[in-house]
C-alpha cells in the first residue's frame, strides 16, 4: 500500500495548506492498520524494499507468522511516521512551537553503523522527515570508509559551525570541539590558519569548509595531515583524484545550504525521558553589543569579537576562545571552572608559538568572578566579549577597567553540553 505523498508535497517551496490537506491519505492508513491487526492471516507491505522478499515467500509458500508480524510492525511504524509528519505540519501552520503535550519525532534508518560511540555499543543513523541538501543527513559521500558514529557527530559539529560565517572559512573539529577556526579571502589560507591554531589536535580531525573544495587546498590537506573527514558544499572535479590518493579519507559534499532552514529542536535522552528544546539559533551583530568598559573596543576588535563569539557557541562549556585577525589562537573547552578554560586556551596558544598579546577573548557564559579577567589580562588579552548577567558583573567590569581591557556584553548565553 502506497500512501498519498504528503511529506513530498509539504517540502515543495510553493506548497499551500490546501495542497497539504489534499495529500493527507485517509483510506490508505485505515487499510494498512486493518491489515496489520489481522496479520495472522494477512501480509501488508508498505516498503518497496520488501516487495521482492514478500513475492518470493508467497511463491514458495514459506511466509511464516514471524515474517507477517515483522511486516505488520513496519506497517504500524509507517503510519505512525505519516501521522507524525501531519501533526508537525499542522502545528507549525498555527504558529505552535510543537512543544505540545505529546512530542512526536519520526526518522528513517539510513544505515546501520559498525558500532556506537564505543565498540561495545550498537548504533544506526536515522534521517528525519525534513533532511535536505545542505544538511549532513542529506549529504553525499564521494569516497572513503563508511562513516562511524563519532565521525557523524563530529562532522555535524564542524558543518554547523562553519555555516555561521559569510566569508570563506575553515573549521577543524576534534571530539566535537573546534580546535582551529579561521576566515580569509579563500579557503586555502583559511585552512592554513585554522590548522596553525592547534596542529596536534587537528591530527585525525574533521575539516569543514563553507566554500567548494578546490584541488590546491585538497593537496595541502592530504600532504600535511591525517584527516578523518572533509566536508564542503561541493568538491571540485580536479580535487577528487588528489583526495583519492588517501582512499580511506571520507569526503562529503552537502550541496548548497543557503536556503536550508536549520533544525528546530535539540534532543537529549535522560533516564526515563527526553529533554527537548528549541535549537540555539541565536545570532548577534555589532548593534547588539553593549560596551561596559571605560576603554571602547576598536573596529578590528569588534570584528574579532563577533568571530570569536560564533566559535564559542560550538565549544563545549565552559568555553573560552582566544582570537586575533580572524583566526582562533587558543581554545579552552569543557572545563568545570571558567578560569581554567582561560588558562588552557593560553597554554594551547603558547605551545603552538602563537602570540596572545592584543587578542580578544570570548566566553560562552558570564564570569562569576574576576579571576577569569585577571588571567586573561595576564596573558595579553586586550578585549573581551561575554554575555554578562552575573551578580558580580560590577566586579568583573571593574577588573577589566583595572587592566585596561575593552569589554562588551551580548546579553545572550551559549551553553553547550
Image (cartoon, helix red, strand yellow):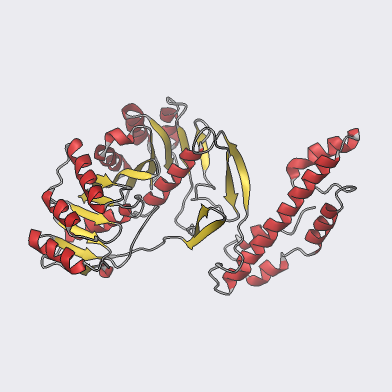
As drawn, is 288 to the left or to the right of 359?
right
Picture coordinates of residue 136 (x, y %)? 50, 47
- As displayed, is residue 10 above or below residue 336? below
Q: Is residue 264 in view from this perspective? A: no
- As displayed, is residue 213 above or below residue 269? above
What is the residue that sits farthest to the top in this orientation?
Answer: 245
Residue at image point 65% right, 61% down: 84
Please name whichever residue, 388 or 11, is drawn nearer the observer in this view of the structure. Answer: 388
Q: Quadrant of residue 249?
A: top left
Q: Is residue 366 in view from this perspective? A: yes
As drawn, is 112 to the left or to the right of 117?
right
Please name whichever residue, 259 or 321, is drawn nearer the observer in this view of the structure. Answer: 321
Residue at image point 24% right, 61% down: 368
Picture coordinates of residue 106 (x, y %)? 62, 55
Please name whichever residue, 235 or 153, is drawn nearer the observer in this view of the structure. Answer: 153
Picture coordinates of residue 143 (x, y %)? 50, 32
Picture coordinates of residue 399 (x, y %)? 13, 62
Amino acid at each position: 500500500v502506497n500512501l498519498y505523498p504528503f511529506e513530498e508535497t509539504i517540502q515543495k517551496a510553493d506548497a499551500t495548506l490546501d495542497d497539504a490537506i489534499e495529500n493527507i491519505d485517509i483510506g490508505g492508513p485505515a487499510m494498512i492498520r486493518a491489515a496489520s491487526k489481522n496479520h495472522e492471516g494477512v501480509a501488508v507491505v508498505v516498503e518497496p524494499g520488501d516487495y521482492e522478499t514478500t513475492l518470493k515467500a508467497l511463491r514458495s509458500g514459506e511466509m511464516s507468522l514471524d515474517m507477517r508480524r515483522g511486516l505488520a510492525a513496519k506497517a504500524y511504524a509507517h503510519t505512525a511516521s505519516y501521522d507524525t509528519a501531519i501533526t508537525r505540519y499542522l502545528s507549525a501552520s498555527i504558529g505552535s512551537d510543537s512543544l505540545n503535550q505529546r512530542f512526536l519525532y519520526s526518522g528513517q534508518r539510513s544505515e546501520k553503523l559498525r558500532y556506537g560511540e564505543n565498540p561495545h555499543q550498537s548504533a544506526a543513523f536515522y534521517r528525519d522527515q525534513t533532511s535536505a541538501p545542505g544538511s549532513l543527513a542529506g549529504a553525499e559521500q564521494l569516497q572513503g570508509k563508511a562513516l562511524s558514529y563519532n565521525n557523524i557527530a563530529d562532522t555535524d559539529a564542524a558543518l554547523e559551525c562553519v555555516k555561521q560565517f559569510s566569508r570563506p572559512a575553515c573549521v577543524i573539529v576534534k571530539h566535537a570541539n573546534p580546535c582551529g577556526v579561521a576566515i580569509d579571502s579563500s579557503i586555502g589560507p583559511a585552512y592554513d590558519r585554522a590548522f596553525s591554531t592547534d596542529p596536534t589536535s587537528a591530527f585525525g580531525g574533521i575539516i569543514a569548509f563553507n566554500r567548494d573544495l578546490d584541488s590546491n587546498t585538497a593537496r595541502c590537506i592530504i600532504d600535511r595531515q591525517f584527516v578523518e573527514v572533509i566536508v564542503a558544499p561541493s568538491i571540485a572535479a580536479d580535487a577528487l583524484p588528489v583526495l583519492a590518493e588517501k582512499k580511506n579519507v571520507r569526503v562529503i559534499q552537502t550541496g548548497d545550504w543557503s536556503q536550508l532552514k536549520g533544525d528546530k529542536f535539540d534532543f537529549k535522552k535522560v533516564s526515563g525521558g527526553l529533554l527537548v528544546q528549541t535549537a540555539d539559533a541565536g545570532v548577534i551583530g555589532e548593534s547588539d553589543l553593549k560596551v561596559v568598559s571605560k576603554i571602547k573596543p576598536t573596529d578590528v576588535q569588534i570584528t574579532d569579537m563577533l568571530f570569536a563569539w560564533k566559535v564559542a557557541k560550538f565549544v563545549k562549556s565552559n568555553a573560552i576562545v582566544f582570537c586575533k585577525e580572524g583566526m582562533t589562537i587558543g581554545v579552552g573547552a569543557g572545563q568545570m571552572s571558567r578560569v581554567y578554560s582561560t588558562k588552557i586556551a593560553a597554554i594551547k596558544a603558547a605551545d603552538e608559538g602563537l602570540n596572545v598579546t592584543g587578542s580578544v577573548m570570548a566566553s560562552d557564559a558570564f564570569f562569576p568572578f574576576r579571576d577569569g579577567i585577571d588571567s586573561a589580562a595576564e596573558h595579553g588579552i586586550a578585549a573581551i566579549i561575554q554575555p554578562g548577567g552575573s551578580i558580580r558583573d560590577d566586579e568583573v567590569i571593574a577588573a577589566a577597567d583595572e587592566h585596561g581591557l575593552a569589554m562588551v556584553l551580548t546579553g545572550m548565553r551559549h551553553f553547550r553540553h
